[in-house]
Image (cartoon, rainbow, N blue to C red):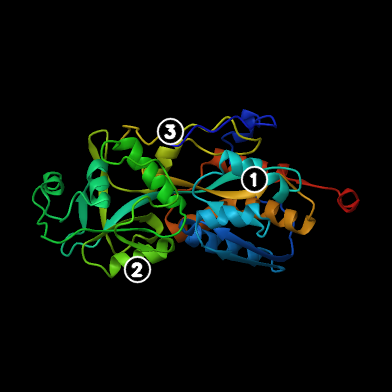
Amino acid sequence: MRAAVAAVALLPLAACGSTGGASPAASTAPQVTGTFKAAGASSQQKAMGAWIEGFTAANPGVSVTYDPAGSGKGREEFLAGTTAYGASDVPLTDDEMKASGQACDGGNAIDLPVYISPIVVVFDVPGVAALNLSSATIARLFTGKIHTWDDAEVAADNPGVQLPDLPVTPVHRSDSSGTTDNFTDWLHATAPDAWEFDASSDWPLADGLSGEGTGGVVDVVKATAGAVAYVDASQAGGMGTAAINVGGTWVKSSAAGAAGAAGLSPRDESRYQDDMSYRLDRTTTNTNAYPLVLVSYLLVCSRYTDHEQGQFVKAFVDYIASDAGQAAGTKAAGSAALTPAQQDWLRSAANDIFLVPEAKAKS
């Protein structure tokens, strides 16, 4: 598991009341104008497209472009101050958080959970649409310890399934990826004997094929008989999928299961005010949860001297938290809807973003 996050809470934690269960009121954010760009997690690509479409329809003076270049690129560009916001399937590290002051005009970055989705183990095995695969078996498929799909270990969990003598070809992300980080974190937590590597955004093995972004991995799998990969569920359609073992039960990926896993995971109490990053519980035995999950974040600043950009970020976060924003995102991506408490938290965080008075900013 990754190292615990050091205490960096220079500001007091937001009061618990800010995440109360009341449904959020209709958005009252003012219309904004300007041209903005963002980059980050490819997992969020479908939801982000829907959010941008809905937001710009309500704010015709705004233009937003999103580059699904991966979580690593999203964090890098956000911290360099070249994007209005970033998107990442893992929260900022301690070092990244400490370095955020420059990009955030003397304030700090905030991780805001906006997208909760299962990661699905997908495969292309002719004649097979679904399998049961334990985390240890999955680890061995990706490390090359299992060479063919009719291996006894795969067959033992899939009685009655006709498995071919077909070579296994693992496929991984070629870019720095939060999906990879979450996948390797789950493998290390649940199958440490079979997966010796720590969680990492960079794939630790040289063997196998690779693709850039979620879409690139999907393209490789669909073109390669015998391939196995891990992808965000939003782009898993048309491929074989695996159920994983949770508490002795085979659990299929679902938005409800992803939401359940996030709901069982504690918030990281060491973070800044309004930051809502999670310490995901990968080893839960609750069969209502699907712990091979990613919680993907919007990366924003606590303060802005650029009022145009600050007003945009405040309004955009407010829109994502709205019922309309949630409906658009979940319909596009099949992801889990945020709870009313999570929606309230995002709206509170948007409200707390500070715009430096223009006279002071110019002095």
Q: Residue at x 56, y 53 (%)?
A: 87
Identify the residue at the far front of this view. Answer: 206
Q: Give x and y (percent) for residue 311.
A: 74, 55
> Tags 1 and 3 in contact by the CB under 8 Å rule?
no
Disc with the residue nearer the chain's start (2 vs 3): 2
Left or right of 110, for residue 206:
left
Q: CA distance from mark 2 to mark 3?
A: 34 Å
Asked if 191 appears above or below 16 in the picture, the reply is: below
Q: Residues within 10 Å of mark 3 (few under 14, many from 20)?
A: some
Which residue is disc 1 drawn over?
A: 25
Asked if 251 appears above or below 52 in the picture, the reply is: above
Q: Residues within 10 Å of mark 1 (few under 14, many from 20)?
A: few
Q: Secondary structure at mark 3?
A: loop
Which residue is disc 3 drawn over?
A: 264
Q: CA distance from mark 1 to mark 3?
A: 26 Å
Which residue is disc 2 drawn over?
A: 219
